Amino acid sequence: MPDDQASAEKHPVDLLARNREWAADRIRQDPAFFERLVKQQSPKFLWIGCSDSRVPANEIVGLAPGELFVHRNVANIVVHSDLNCLAVLQYAVDVLQVEHVIVCGHYGCGGIRAAIENQRLGLIDNWFRHVQDVARHHTEELDLLPTNAARWDRLCELNVEAQVEAVIRTTIVQDAWARGQRLSVHGWIYGIHDGILRELTALRDGA
Ligand code: ZN
């Protein structure tokens, strides 16, 4: 049976059964695993990524539960009026004291494509206006590219860079740097076609 067919036939009850297997397997490998997690979480990383099901944050960087604090939304957008994203960022920086914020986009992002093609998908079109703003800032560069595929790829990258800048401009990061807190911000992009993460923006810190 092809994988996609198997996936289509899964039901929530199957997921619950898989969860029992997973938890039992964890305990077999490390009997104190859940006990340790209950006591505290001390992740060093905040991941701001796309909701896309093909980009599972912990899995692609090989981190276990407890090691990565995660915020995901469609097209990994950081908006200064998004209370949800800001609350995650503030909690991660001020309370958990993460040392790295990683904004991670991915090639083949459906949100970026919808923005670039001006698709009408419903309420989410308003969310994609933020990506269209990024495109508008880079019209000249994007127009020079030979194909729509190339424009799509490049806008995926430009969007990450814009969201890194948005993270840096928040009062949360500015205040952390002003008080000398160790915190760097990274922009990465993931290739769904090869599973590889690439660094787009050099490490940015307050120094
Ligand atoms: Zn995406």
Image (cartoon, rainbow, N blue to C red):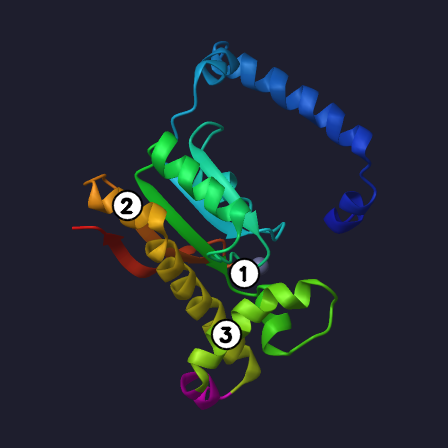
Label 2's element?
helix
- Asked where in the image residue 66 lies, by quadrant, the reply is top left
Mark toward the viewer: 2 or 3: 2
Report the residue at 58% width, 77% height from top: 116
Ranked by sequence position, the earlier of labels 3 and 1 is 3
Ranked by sequence position, the earlier of labels 2 and 3 is 3
Q: CA distance from mark 2 to mark 3?
A: 27 Å
Q: CA distance from mark 3 to mark 1?
A: 27 Å
Residue at the outermost left position: 207
Give the residue at mark 1: 193
Let me know if residue 44 appears in the view. no
Q: Quadrant of ligand 1?
A: bottom right
Residue 59, above or below 19: below
> Observer-nearest residue: 44 or 63?
44
Give neighbour class at mark 2: few <14, some 14-19, many 20+ (Cα, 10 Å): few
Residue 187, above or below 116: above
Give the residue at mark 2: 175
Which amino acid does the dot numbered 1 rest on? His
Q: CA distance from mark 1 to mark 2?
A: 38 Å
> Observer-nearest residue: 62 or 5?
62
Let me know if residue 33 appears in the view. yes
Which amino acid does the dot numbered 2 rest on? Asp
Residue 137, above or below 39: below
**Rendering coords of residue 126 (x, y %):** 64, 67
Give neighbour class at mark 3: few <14, some 14-19, many 20+ (Cα, 10 Å): some
**Rendering coords of residue 33 (x, y %):** 49, 15
Give the residue at mark 3: 133
Which amino acid does the dot numbered 3 rest on? Asp
**Rendering coords of residue 119 (x, y %):** 69, 75
